[in-house]
Amino acid sequence: MARLISPNPIALHRFRPCFPITRLAANPQHHRINTRKFQTLACQTNPNLDQKDVSPTEQEKLAVEPATVNTQTTKTTTSSLPQLPNKDVNNKIALVSTLAALGLFLFARLDLGVSLKDLSTTAVPYEEALSNGKPTVVEFYADWCEVCRELAPDVYKVEQQYKDQVNFVMLNVDNTKWEQELDEFGVEGIPHFAFLDKEGNEEGNVVGRLPRQYLLENVDALARGQASVPHARVVGQYSSAETRRVHQVVDPRSHG
């Protein structure tokens, strides 16, 4: 029996790859696997495979919880801030401080009610002061003089300290008896303090509202017999002696 010899052996090899392809196409199992994988990829709805689905309720909680945390944080910060003082409390404190300062001022000035009348009652008569051999402080004053009343406590304190060494004389400018002394000492404003040595010579004068230290230092210089006083000519706020209300002398022997 004669063999069939193909005139083109290469053509026979070309048909061999078709048989496995035909079997693969005829195999329904392989086709279903490929289709199932394709459907799985096509039906994927969540692009982020690593993130789990979150229900709408949980999403609302996540959206609300940060606001709640912020509110709590704000309340905590507000409660931790120091409370500012109440305006009424500040007003009360200011009022109490003002009243206290005014009370101290009045207490220092009035000194438990020392008045010009008290000073004139305890004053040494002018004629006696010129003859007892002591240095003298002569104060020209008036009952209506506001500065005179204000300085009365200071004069009283100095007088109590030096009354055994120095004469303290009070001359009321409203009394016509002292017209000559007013001209002699050149009194234009009151209170007017004239400082006389033990011979009756004037060493200096102080007029008006001045610190008590000035009066104290001048009196101390007189008490120690110094030739001059440290404050020989000082003028502060005073009341004009030109506005004095002259009256008739009730008692010619009065030194007030």
Image: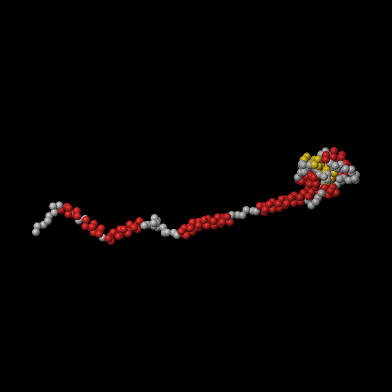
Which x, y percent locates residue 81? 59, 54
Q: State the residue at coordinates (77%, 49%).
A: 109
Residue 206 visible in this rendered orientation of the protein? no
Query: Percent x, y for residue 180?
Result: 87, 39
Residue 241, horizontal then vertical, whole percent: 82, 40
Outermost residue, left side = 1
Way the structure is coloured? secondary structure
Where, by quadrant of the figure, is residue 17 drawn?
bottom left
Q: Residue at x 54, y 56 (%)?
A: 71
In the depicted view, which residue is nearer to us: 42 or 183?
42
Determine the residue positioned at 25% across, 58% down. Answer: 25
Return the x and y of residue 147 as percentages of the image width and height: 79, 44
- Whether 106 is drawn above or below 31: the answer is above
- Please name whichever residue, 85 or 136, is drawn nearer the observer in this view of the structure: 85
Query: Furthest residue to the bottom?
Result: 29
**Is any part of residue 43 visible from this angle?**
yes
Which quarter of the rendered picture does the N terminus lie within?
bottom left
- Tell me which residue sits at (49%, 56%) in the image: 63
